[in-house]
């Protein structure tokens, strides 16, 4: 255990700090999902130029073209979180599609999509889930029928985040209807402007329409839009899911949120006393602090594991489950601490933090469900992490009844 | 930067595990504690022979002079086996207190004997856990009067190191006139607890060259007990998983039932980040003294919570078998329960963690009045 940085990394850390201090006036308002604002795009371009985002993506595809250096990436994330500075653009295109294309895309696909995606000019949505295929994603039915140079796509996607704004979709479709369920799927890229696509926003509990239903009627997609081989979309998707899981439950977000919660409890009062003077709230706060620290150190452990080339399996598998739950608990405590004020929402007078705590409290539930539900995460931890037996197939299951 | 254990540390843990597998299995444990709480002298000598009792003793006195981390890693493995030895008192708290605050003469006299395993020391820091009833001792002119409760250490202890109400540490010889030791019996027979009455007992002040000796000693003890819980909880989880992969009901392994699977996954998901928290706390003890107390409080409070929850859930995974004496699961259950209360219960530790961060004036006021948590 040695947490000191080498002189090179120390110098790098100072560089990042200086950069953030100098650029503070240029920081765009904190990141939201969906299309990037012009300020956010300018900020993104600057971060790429400095190598603070898209760091190891080749220059020819719009990245910074630096050597991969996990430690520098860690320093960047840490310093941005410490300063409360907005990081580079995220979203499913940058976080999931780009790494997938870099790993499995054709040179033309990389050429065409990576750069505009990185710059925030091209917005993507992820068309995986269907009404009949959520946790059991491989049972998806949207069909893509071979029509010479094209596929003809018919079916429906659901819960498609940002589809109403997106330029493009990466989708899973069934190209081989007779193959076993995991082998008949292909991974397609398609413009949302293609005739036959209809997007209907779905309003969520937050009051906004964060996601959509997407209907496909005889949508023509050239065969060159497949990523990876035909019928191997499941493997390609798993590459993407790996990146999605890495994205959810980030301990830096928990750290940021915890700091906001401390400030809130120091600044707000009840009966004229600081909320921090309420011993029960304070106890709950410290309880959560231990969890936040544990997840942050767990993150450092994973980072070192990667540097050493040996990643502790369980420590990684738990991140989405624990991290999303922790964020939710932090928002819940903020709301409890604020009491009636914590209820205020939308454009109410006396609103705190622009209603962010309520919004996060609700949206976190979406993140606990999305990207592999908490229950699915537990299945994965138990089966892959602890080596417990898989669920027997239904046909082999015993008759119910007979319990005591 | 490297956040993890060294090859050397891992292999030390592995060789200790190998030793305990043959020397401290369940049947051994059962026979050793058959008549109540005990310190296993044979096992202790085994640890001394491996050089583990002198890890924290400075090299000048024949020890290894290693940072707290290494001793904590030993304590973790002892927790895995619920090993009935008073390691925390004699191999962590005593050498730290003596090294921090002992005179040259005291160090010369006692430290080498900690290394060879011939000396046992009892330690009582009343303040770390808070004073129940009227517990506490007062020091006047190097004479101690009062009553200590929940001293840790072996019956064969030749020395007592204790804190007094004024916050100083004292060294007392076991055979000093005016001392009266009574064994207390906790649910956990793998460790010993004592009530000690002192009437005009002659004591030697342990005076640090600079700063305070009590705070680091408390912190080290807390980190050690947190490590013990980590080991014990890991064993309970491993046993639950193993049992669920053997036991069949309804013509299938119970581990294939999702209710069981999810209990195990939740235990793993809670426990695994504790490992990183503990490592950091042990690292901070030596490398980031500013954070020493905060991290020690967090590590022990959080592992106390997670540990007790695992102790319960892992027992439940074993069904009726878990409740019996047959599997011996209860040794770990009780070990975790012991670690939770001794040297500060989770609520007390969280209150202290808040205070060292300056959160809450009420707590500050209490401290100013001298009645607050240390
Ligand atoms: C905010 C948000 C954004 C999303 N964005 C996208 C997106 O952009 N693109 C996209 O394709 N999808 C998206 N999704 C969909 C998301 O991936 C699915 O909601 C998720 O995989 C769960 O599927 P489901 O909703 O059909 O629930 P179901 O699979 O029907 O699950 C319902 C309940 O049953 C439980 N369950 C199901 N199977 C099992 C099992 N084997 N063991 C134990 N319990 C089980 C679940 O845990 C859950 O509690 C998003 C979802 C949310 C909430």
Image: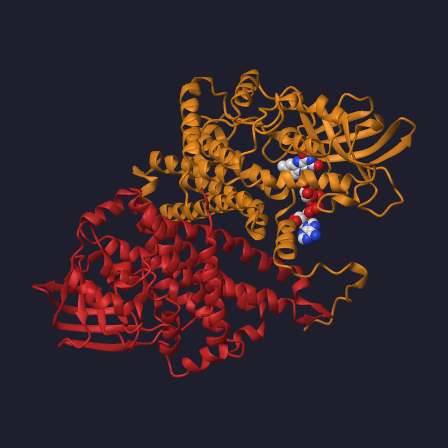
In the displayed structure, B250 sits above or below A158; it is below
In-image side of A358 versus A1 (left or right): right
Query: Percent from the top left, x then y, of residue B81?
Result: 47, 69
The residue depicted at 46 percent of the width and 62 percent of the height is: B13
Residue placed at 60% from the left, 24% from the top?
A63
Q: Nearer the viewer, residue A251 or B220?
A: B220
Whole-percent x, y for residue B331 in the image: 46, 73
A287 sits to left or right of A55: left
Relative to A242, say whether B104 is above or below. below
Residue at 87% from the left image edge and 40% from the top image edge: A176
Tell me: residue A58, above or below residue A322. above
Q: Is residue B181 visible?
A: yes
Say if A287 sits above or below B162 in the image. Answer: above
In the picture provided, is A167 more to the left or to the right than A147?
left
User: Which residue sits furthest left?
Assistant: B141
Q: On the image, which quarter does residue A92 sit in?
A: top right
Chain B: give its colour.
Answer: red
Which colour represents chain A?
A: orange
Percent from the top left, x then y, of residue A120?
A: 62, 21
Ligand 1 visible in quadrant: top right
* Residue displayed at 80% across by 63% down: A396
- The structure's colour scheme is by chain
């Amino acid at each position: 255990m040695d947490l000191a940085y080498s002189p090179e990394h120390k110098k790098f850390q100072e560089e990042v700090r200086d950069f953030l201090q100098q650029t503070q006036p240029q920081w765009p308002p904190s990141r939201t999902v969906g299309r990037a604002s012009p300020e956010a795009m300018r900020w993104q371009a600057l971060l790429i130029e400095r190598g603070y985002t898209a760091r190891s993506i080749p220059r020819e595809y719009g990245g910074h073209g630096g050597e991969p250096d996990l430690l520098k990436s860690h320093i960047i994330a840490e310093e941005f979180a410490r300063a409360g500075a907005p990081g580079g653009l995220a979203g499913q295109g940058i976080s999931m599609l780009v790494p997938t294309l870099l790993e499995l895309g054709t040179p033309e696909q990389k050429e065409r999509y990576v750069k505009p995606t990185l710059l925030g000019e091209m917005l993507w949505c992820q068309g995986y889930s269907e009404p009949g295929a959520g946790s059991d994603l491989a049972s998806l039915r949207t069909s893509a029928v071979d029509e010479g140079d094209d596929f003809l796509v018919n079916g429906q996607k659901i819960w498609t985040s940002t589809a109403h704004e997106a330029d493009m979709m990466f989708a899973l479709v069934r190209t081989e209807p007779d193959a076993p369920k995991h082998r008949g799927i292909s991974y397609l890229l398609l413009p949302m402007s293609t005739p036959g696509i209809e997007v209907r926003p779905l309003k969520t509990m937050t009051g906004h329409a964060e996601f959509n239903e997407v209907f496909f009627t005889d949508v023509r997609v050239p065969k060159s839009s497949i990523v990876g081989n035909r019928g191997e979309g499941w493997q390609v998707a798993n590459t993407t899911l790996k990146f999605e899981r890495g994205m959810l439950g980030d301990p830096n977000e928990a750290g940021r949120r915890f700091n906001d919660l401390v400030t809130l409890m120091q600044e707000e009062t009840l009966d004229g006393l600081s909320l921090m003077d309420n011993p029960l709230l304070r106890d709950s706060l410290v309880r959560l602090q231990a969890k936040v620290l544990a997840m942050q150190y767990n993150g450092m452990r994973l980072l070192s594991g990667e540097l050493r080339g040996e990643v502790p399996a369980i420590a990684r598998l738990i991140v989405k489950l624990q991290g999303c739950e922790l964020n939710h608990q932090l928002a819940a405590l903020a709301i409890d601490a604020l009491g009636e004020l914590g209820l205020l929402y939308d454009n109410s007078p006396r609103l705190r933090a622009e209603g962010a705590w309520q919004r996060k409290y609700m949206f976190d539930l979406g993140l606990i469900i999305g990207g592999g539900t908490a229950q699915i995460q537990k299945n994965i931890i138990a089966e892959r992490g602890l080596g417990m037996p898989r669920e027997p197939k239904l046909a082999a299951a015993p008759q119910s009844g007979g319990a005591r | 930067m490297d956040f993890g254990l060294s090859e050397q540390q891992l292999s030390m843990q592995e060789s200790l595990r190998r030793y305990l597998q043959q020397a401290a299995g369940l049947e051994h444990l059962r026979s050793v504690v058959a008549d109540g709480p005990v310190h296993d002298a044979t096992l202790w000598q085994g640890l001394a022979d491996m050089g583990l009792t002198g890890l924290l003793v400075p090299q000048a006195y024949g020890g290894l002079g290693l940072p707290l981390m290494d001793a904590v890693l030993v304590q973790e493995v002892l927790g895995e086996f619920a090993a009935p030895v008073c390691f925390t008192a004699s191999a962590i708290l005593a050498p730290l207190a003596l090294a921090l605050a002992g005179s040259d003469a005291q160090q010369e006299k006692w430290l080498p004997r900690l290394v060879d395993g011939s000396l046992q020391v009892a330690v009582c820091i009343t303040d770390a856990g808070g004073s129940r009833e009227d517990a506490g001792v007062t020091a006047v002119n190097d004479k101690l009067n009062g009553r200590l409760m929940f001293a840790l250490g072996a019956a064969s202890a030749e020395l007592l190191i204790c804190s007094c109400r004024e916050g100083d540490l004292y060294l007392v010889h076991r055979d000093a006139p005016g001392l009266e030791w009574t064994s207390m019996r906790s649910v956990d027979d793998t460790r010993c607890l004592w009530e000690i009455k002192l009437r005009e007992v002659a004591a030697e002040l342990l005076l640090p060259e600079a700063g305070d000796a009590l705070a680091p000693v408390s912190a080290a003890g807390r980190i050690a007990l947190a490590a013990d819980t980590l080991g014990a909880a890991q064993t309970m989880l491993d046993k639950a998983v193993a049992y669920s992969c053997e036991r069949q009901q309804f013509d299938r392994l119970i581990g294939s039932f999702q209710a069981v699977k999810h209990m195990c996954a939740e235990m793993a998901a809670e426990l695994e980040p504790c490992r990183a928290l503990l490592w950091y706390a042990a690292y901070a003890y030596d490398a980031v003294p500013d954070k020493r107390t905060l991290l020690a409080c967090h590590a022990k409070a959080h592992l106390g919570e997670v540990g007790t929850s695992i102790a319960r859930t892992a027992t439940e995974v074993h069904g009726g078998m878990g409740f019996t004496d047959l599997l011996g699961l209860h040794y770990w259950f009780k070990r975790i329960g012991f670690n939770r209360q001794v040297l500060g219960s989770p609520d007390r530790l969280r209150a202290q963690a808040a205070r060292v961060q300056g959160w809450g004036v009420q707590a500050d006021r209490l401290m100013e009045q001298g009645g607050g948590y240390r």
